[in-house]
Amino acid sequence: MQKSIKTGLEALLRPEDSIVVLIDHQPFQFANLNSHEPTMIINAVAGLSKAAKVFNVPTILTTVIEERGGLIIKQIQEIFPEQKPINRTLINTWQDPNVTDVVAKTGRKQLIIAGLWTEVCVAMPAIQAAAEGYDVFVVTDACGGASAEAHDMAVRRMVQHGITPITWMAVASEWQRDWARTETAINLGPVLIDHAGATGVAFAWELQLLATPVPAN
């Protein structure tokens, strides 16, 4: 049975209720990634990770058999240098209490997931967590699959279970919500410049224009 879907403001992300789980962004998974250009996923997951830091959103890193599949990519690890990713043998992250116990202890119910591959290591925990009462969001541009069809079918499947697909920029925007929140806006700006593509370029240009004196007549 599909869970009831939150509506209105309750459906939007809040930093104080959010927790991020990043799953298996490792060399082996990237080696057979065919749904996206890998650099786009790396950029998106780095942007998501930095945004989580800006808003003090707890972020859990996890890998599967890292001694064979490789360490988590440096673009994530360098953002959380103090954190050792939880290494699993279970394909389904949500069956590993080393991960789920950490999530449960935070008491946060807005679960934001990104990982490789979408059809396997993202779909499994997302579907299980949704059934356990979490409000699950999957950051689709920070995920990827073995094929474009695999990624697309996984997203469609998860939607059937009440899971919300979202992009990293939408996550950061919902966390910010109001540009008058200057304590986070000032730190989110550099993240956008580095990872938001044309939006970041335009933002940097706006800062340049604001800092340029107007010539006297």
Image (cartoon, helix red, strand yellow):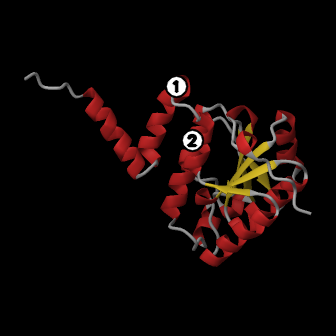
Q: Is residue 96 above or below residue 14?
A: below
Q: Which residue is located at x 84 percent, y 48 percent? A: 134
Secondary structure, mark 2, is: helix
204 vs 75, left or right, is left
Q: Earlier in the sequence, mark 2 or mark 1?
A: 2
In the picture, residue 140 is in which quadrant? bottom right
- Which one is in front, 104 or 70? 104
Would you name the residue on which mark 1 appears? Answer: 180
Q: Quadrant of the C terminus?
A: top left
Q: Which residue is located at x 41 percent, y 48 percent? A: 199
Residue 94 in the image: state x and y as whole percent: 85, 54
Q: Which residue is located at x 71 percent, y 58 percent? A: 67
Secondary structure, mark 1, is: loop
In the picture, residue 158 is in which quadrant? bottom right
- Which one is in front, 95 or 163? 163
Residue type, numbered disc 2: Ser
Residue type, numbered disc 1: Ala
User: Does residue 147 appear anywhere in the picture?
Assistant: no
- Classify mark 2: residues with Cα within 10 Å, few (<14), some (14-19) or many (20+): some
Would you name the residue on which mark 2 appears? Answer: 173
Q: Is residue 88 above or below residue 79?
A: below
Q: CA distance from mark 2 to mark 1?
A: 13 Å
Q: Quadrant of the N terminus?
A: bottom right
Q: Residue furthest front?
A: 8
